[in-house]
Image (spheres, rainbow, N blue to C red):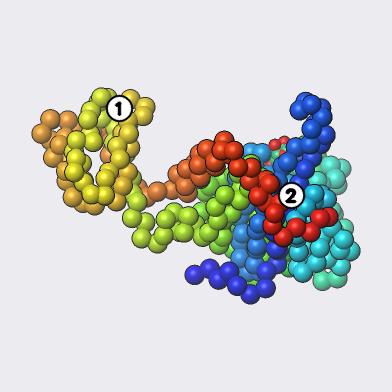
Amino acid sequence: MVLRTGSPCLEIEGLIHDVGPIAAEGGRMKRVLAGVDLTAYAGQVTVLLGVNGAGKTTTLECAQGLRRRTGGFIRLLGEDPQTAGADLRARVGVMLQDGGLPPSARPIALLKHVAGMYRNPLPVDELAERLGLDQFSGTNIRRLSGGQKQRVALAAALVGRPEVVFLDEPSAGLDPQSRQVVFDLIHELRAQGLGIILTTHLLDDAERLADWVAILDRGHIVAEGTVAELLGGATQAARRMTVRAPSGLDLAAAFAGARPAIEVRESPAGHYTIEGELTTAHLAALAQWLDARGIMPSSLELGSRSLEDVFLGIAEASAAQDSLPTNRAHEAEGRKVETA
Ligand SMILES: Nc1ncnc2c1ncn2[C@@H]1O[C@H](COP(=O)(O)OP(=O)(O)OP(=O)(O)O)[C@@H](O)[C@H]1O
């Protein structure tokens, strides 16, 4: 069970961030974050999930004090990141999306330099070996592959033994083996009590890493919870069958009268998705219906609802909500707001 109590390492309430004026939009300001609320705890991985442009990086940058917020309240390890000094920075690790690494430096020399800025850094050689940096220690950062740069950036974020770490798309560009190394390290750091806040647009990352997922869509948190909660509870009652068979079949007829109702869609042609609280009786009904017509499907698959379904459903609902006259940005402004 994920406990959302105790002392949070990051508290964000009603965060608003405007950028601009934007020439392409007639010189108007653009509201990038429209009242984001998010709390992250020590010893947990909090994942900020959203499509490209949802506002994930902007949220992290405001949380780190790298961007001035337009409105709202932020406490990072109990301090306002915008006004805090070097003491707070020494307790926070940051891995930026583009790495932000000096191109002419060599990985281990750079890490030793970064480690020298902290009172009690991790042993550089051990960390470098763990992340496989020793394999390219003599190469300039500019010549490293994207995945190698990612690993150097992660090491630089961790070397100071931070209490909280921000990881922007940590698995971007990593091959499966490096990804596993990074994920194992994240799990280990969490167990040691580090607060980990990471962004991703990869649902698989969220499913594998997250204690808590907050889904960001066009500047709002539109849903949050554990992966199990977002999937609709521990029972996983909602299940799905996919069937490939000749096109144009009335497969819904196999479930006529089922309560609760079973939904059947054909898209694309010959690819059927059957959703609902499926049981073996539904499976038998489908088999009977196909048997009576002498149809053998070319594939039949059973599965649970995935985070991807939840994510797409939420994004759709949020798009519909945004087309309503109520402006959620204005609602957000009515909350507790401390103007920066
Ligand atoms: N300084 C700026 N000027 C104009 N637009 C901006 C500025 N900063 C952010 N934006 C816009 O704000 C939105 C959110 O950007 P942000 O980088 O936070 O998204 P993201 O969720 O991290 O996306 P990605 O997954 O692509 O990194 C985007 O539409 C972006 O273009």
- Residue bearing mark 1: 270
Residue 191 seen in render? no
Q: Amino acid at mark 1?
A: Gly
Residue 31 falls left or right of residue 232 = right
**Image point (55%, 62%), residue name:** 211
Left or right of 68 on screen, residue 274: left
Identified at 57% across, 49% down, the residue is 222
Q: Check residue 30 in the rendering and tell me which mark sits there, or answer none.
A: none
Other residues around mark 1 within 10 Å, as few (<14) / some (14–19) / many (≥20): some
Residue under pointer 2: 16
Distance from the alpha carbon under mark 1 to that under mark 2 = 46 Å
User: Image quadrant of ligand 1?
Assistant: top right
Residue at left 80%, top 46%?
100
Q: Position of residue 332 (x, y in %)?
A: 67, 51
Nearest-to-viewer mark from 1 and 2:
2
Element class at badge 2: strand
Q: Where is 187 relative to 95, above or below? A: below
Q: Secondary structure at mark 1?
A: loop
